């Protein structure tokens, strides 16, 4: 391969646009700056010991959250670029080919590399603490999940500086993603990065399901689990059942492109529709993977800030389970227009509408929890209050889309775009931000400034409605999704301008949010009690931030809202007697998860460009990691009781 | 579910379940098998959809030979029996017998993989590759994924032999052998479905 050919493969014209070159320079400078800073402050050993090799669920949570916030920035910039291009008819903000890339990366990043890791950050931060456990069931596997996610995310983001971004939409449908019509490495990046990150996600699902089923504190029966634990369990089960079809669909597409098979090709009898079916067999449960954890968050937040037990707990559990089962029977509603016939379409239309029932039940239960309570308007609670009407409207437009004849009009229009942003931002993002403000003290040991948080909240909330209300109208006026530009005179201009203004308001909200995080990290009110919200569940019984071993003594649970119950009875976990503390077995740090992530990244990068020597090197790395971990019996160590006593004493939690 | 309750029954449990930590890993492995079942379910459904999409290539009636498939079935089903006997020996604490049963399982599995590769090479010789048609793509990936699982299982079993030789039957090695046996039985069950729905059904049409 000649040098010029190599240069053209790695840096085709699509990555030599002025804005991308500017970002290249920025990334190189930032990278050098970070390397320099680590060297100057002698932090390399610290980075390796405390973070890269950690298996502690609390630190993994922090890494997931940082990654998710960075990806929120990236996906958000993509969104602003899309809105800039659409603000005026016939605009030339960017070329059409780049527009295709930007809407593809916006969707893929927001769903797979922002929302998913953010949710897993919450699981990691809270689930073991809420059930009274010292870690997840498989701590090393948990770290592997994180590094596989990181490898996938880095590989995906590499595409826009080396080789060119994917451009077939976040769904990657053939024939758009087929080699014949889409040469170049972009779609290879897409399939490989999602495969690698998807493996990590599947392992996370297994891990949390087993953790919740097997590792709850004594006395915490299923019907005493906090609702967030129920939602984490149901989400994990959904991951288990949803990701395999995606893995299969992605692998087959990759084989079509890289190894010349004929699954979804137009030639040789391939069937693109099979990809669409497999993708949405994953994709619809994925929608609930994205929102059910936040139903859990809202159930905790609303009870805490209304100072009441959650209304209708058993009904909440039943409806969350009903949503889980129903979500597997609705995937065809994503392609009613592809001609499956009236019988099939009606079945899937009805099953979709049915989901509105358990969801509606949950909405009423949240409202009744607030009813007669002493509602505190914290930022976490404001997101809850914004979520309820937003999600109801998003759900209602979803039911409109489920009406099959009407869908033939709405399909792939901006009405659809507005609908799913309505539920994903109104449900998922508002929920994530609510959780961020609620659990931040537990994760980092300080409260986020409420005043700044309220500014960010109002900018997000108002910005959201200004952005997406016009998009419903645009959809009804016939504007279809993924169009790069439009002529004037269709009546679309003013609405698009309003929508772009809304996107800028949301962007301002993000800036305030980041300022809030940084400001509070430096100046924020330290959480000295460990229970800043007067909480109800076990994580608030621990100091903030939580010591490595979580619980010096595993608590015994006697009721729902275990910590609230203990406080009512005047009990505390903070008054340990020295003889209650014993040696604690803790998982040992390991470099294997990090190295495994590196090896998978190398395989992914090599396969994207079909450079087989690189693939073989990475493959050998994977084999070595697996062999090492298979023969490694030295995976835990004992924290001496004295060490734990000293640590608890320094936190003021030991008697005598 | 909770630890104190489990302790009372410890004596009655087989060695691989006796330690709480190891027993949790077995639960985890069952969950992994759930995802693997769904991988195969997706591959089977793809095969069902693409069975008749033969394009210009051979159909299943023209292609499949039952001779090698019968041999593969015999080898794999027997290997499932031998690993079962291995677990029986393990629970009686007979480390030597366990090692021999695993060795025999590996040999039978290798015979299966060898026969399958031979079969695939003969298809390739008449240009029936997965480039030819969607049917062959779906067939190759379904049967190939199963074959790759068996191959991986063989290497896994080899690493277990080394661990058993060094450590004997402990709570940890027993759990590892037990999860391997679950994996192996699972592949056997998948093969029964492949034999029925792919090969037998493919011959009939």
Image (cartoon, coloured by chain):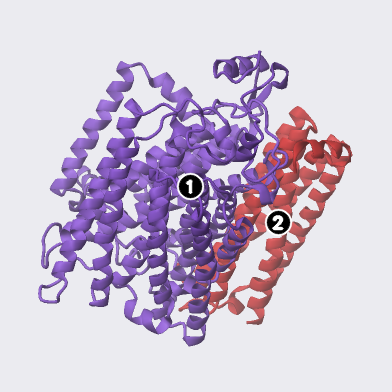
Name the one closer to the observer, B80 or A551. Answer: A551
Q: Quadrant of residue B3?
A: top right
The extreme bottom residue here reads A342
Chain of residue at mark 2:
B
Q: Quadrant of residue A475?
A: bottom left
Residue that label 2 marks: B186
Chain of residue at mark 1:
A
Q: Which chain is purple?
A: A
Q: Is residue A309 above or below residue B91?
A: below
Q: Locate residue B137 relative to residue B83 in the image: left or right.
A: left
Label 1 sits on a secondary structure element that is loop
Q: Which chain is red?
A: B
Residue that label 1 marks: A374
Q: Is residue B14 above or below residue B70?
A: above
Q: Locate residue A431 relative to residue B177 in the image: left or right.
A: left
Q: Residue at x 65, y 16 (%)?
A: A655
Q: Is residue B119 above or below residue A510?
A: below
Label 2 sits on a secondary structure element that is helix
């Amino acid at each position: 391969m000649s040098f010029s050919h190599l240069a053209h493969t790695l840096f085709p014209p699509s990555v030599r646009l002025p804005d991308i070159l500017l970002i290249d320079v920025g990334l190189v400078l930032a990278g050098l700056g970070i390397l320099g800073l680590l060297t100057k402050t002698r932090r390399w050993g610290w980075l390796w010991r405390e973070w890269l090799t950690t298996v502690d669920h609390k630190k993994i949570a922090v890494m997931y959250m940082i990654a998710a916030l960075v990806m929120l920035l990236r996906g958000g910039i993509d969104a602003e670029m899309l809105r800039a291009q659409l603000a005026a008819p016939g605009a030339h903000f960017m070329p059409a080919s780049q527009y295709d890339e930007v809407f593809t990366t916006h969707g893929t990043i927001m769903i797979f590399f922002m929302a998913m890791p953010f949710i897993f950050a919450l699981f990691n931060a809270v689930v073991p603490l809420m059930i009274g456990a010292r870690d997840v069931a498989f701590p090393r596997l948990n770290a592997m999940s994180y590094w596989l996610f990181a490898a996938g995310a880095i590989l995906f983001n590499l595409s826009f500086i080396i080789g060119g971004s994917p451009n077939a939409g976040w769904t990657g449908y053939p024939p758009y993603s087929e080699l014949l019509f889409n040469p170049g490495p972009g779609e290879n990046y897409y399939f490989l990065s999602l495969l690698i990150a998807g493996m990590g996600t599947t392992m996370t699902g297994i891990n949390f399901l087993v953790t919740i089923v097997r590792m709850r504190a004594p006395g915490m029966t299923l019907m005493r689990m906090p609702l967030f634990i129920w939602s984490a369990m149901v989400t994990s089960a959904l991951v288990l059942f949803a990701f395999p079809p995606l893995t299969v669909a992605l692998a087959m597409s990759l084989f079509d492109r890289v190894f010349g098979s004929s699954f979804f090709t137009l030639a040789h009898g391939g069937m693109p529709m099979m990809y669409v079916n497999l993708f949405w067999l994953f994709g619809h449960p994925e929608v609930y993977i994205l929102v059910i954890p936040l139903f859990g968050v809202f159930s905790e937040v609303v009870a805490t800030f209304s100072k009441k037990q959650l209304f209708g707990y058993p009904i909440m559990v039943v409806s969350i389970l009903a949503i889980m089962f129903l979500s597997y029977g609705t995937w065809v509603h994503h392609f009613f227009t592809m001609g499956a016939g009236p019988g099939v379409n009606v079945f899937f239309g009805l099953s979709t509408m049915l989901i509105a029932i358990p969801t509606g039940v949950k909405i009423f239960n949240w409202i009744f929890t607030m009813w007669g309570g002493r509602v505190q308007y914290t930022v976490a609670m404001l997101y809850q209050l914004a979520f309820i009407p937003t999600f109801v409207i998003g759900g209602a437009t979803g039911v409109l889309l489920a009406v099959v004849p009407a869908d033939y009009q709405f399909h792939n229009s901006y009405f659809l775009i507005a609908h799913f942003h309505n539920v994903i931002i109104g449900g998922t993002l508002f929920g994530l931000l609510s959780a961020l403000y609620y659990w931040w003290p537990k994760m980092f040991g300080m409260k986020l400034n409420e005043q700044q948080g309220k500014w960010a909240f109002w900018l997000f909330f108002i910005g959201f409605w200004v952005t997406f209300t016009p998009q419903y109208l645009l959809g009804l006026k016939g504007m279809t999704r993924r169009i790069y530009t439009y002529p004037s005179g269709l009546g679309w201009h003013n609405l698009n301008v309003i929508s772009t203004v809304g996107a800028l308001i949301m962007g301002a909200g993000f800036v305030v949010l980041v300022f809030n995080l940084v400001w509070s990290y430096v100046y924020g009110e330290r959480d000295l009690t460990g229970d800043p919200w007067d909480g109800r569940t076990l994580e608030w019984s621990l100091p903030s931030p939580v010591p490595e071993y979580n619980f010096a003594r595993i608590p015994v649970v006697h009721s729902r809202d275990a910590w609230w119950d203990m406080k009512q009875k005047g009990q505390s976990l903070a008054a340990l007697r020295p003889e209650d503390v014993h040696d604690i077995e803790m998982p040992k740090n390991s470099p294997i998860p990090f190295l495994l992530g590196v090896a998978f990244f190398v395989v992914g990068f090599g396969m994207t460009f079909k450079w087989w020597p690189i693939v073989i090197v990475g493959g050998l790395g994977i084999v070595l990691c697996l062999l090492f971990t298979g023969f490694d019996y030295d995976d835990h160590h004992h924290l001496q009781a004295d060490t734990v006593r000293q640590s608890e004493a320094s936190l003021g939690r030991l008697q005598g | 579910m909770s630890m104190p309750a489990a302790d009372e029954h410890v004596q009655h449990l087989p060695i691989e379940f006796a330690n709480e930590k190891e027993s949790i890993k077995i639960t985890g492995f069952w969950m992994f098998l759930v995802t693997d079942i769904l991988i195969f379910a997706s591959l089977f459904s793809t095969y069902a959809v693409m069975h008749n999409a033969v394009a210009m290539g051979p159909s299943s009636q023209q292609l499949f030979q039952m001779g090698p498939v019968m041999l593969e079935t015999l080898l794999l089903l027997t290997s499932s029996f031998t690993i079962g006997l291995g677990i029986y020996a393990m629970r009686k604490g007979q480390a030597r017998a366990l090692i021999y049963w695993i060795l025999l399982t590996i040999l039978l599995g290798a015979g299966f993989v060898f026969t399958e590769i031979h079969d695939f090479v003969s298809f390739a010789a008449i240009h029936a590759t997965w480039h030819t048609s969607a049917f062959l793509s779906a067939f190759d990936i379904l049967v190939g994924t199963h074959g790759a699982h068996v191959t991986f299982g063989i290497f896994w079993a080899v690493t277990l032999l080394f661990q058993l030789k060094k450590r004997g039957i402990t709570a940890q090695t027993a759990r590892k052998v037990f999860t391997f046996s679950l994996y192996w039985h699972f592949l056997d069950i998948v093969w029964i479905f492949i034999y029925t729905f792919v090969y037998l059904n493919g011959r009939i049409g």
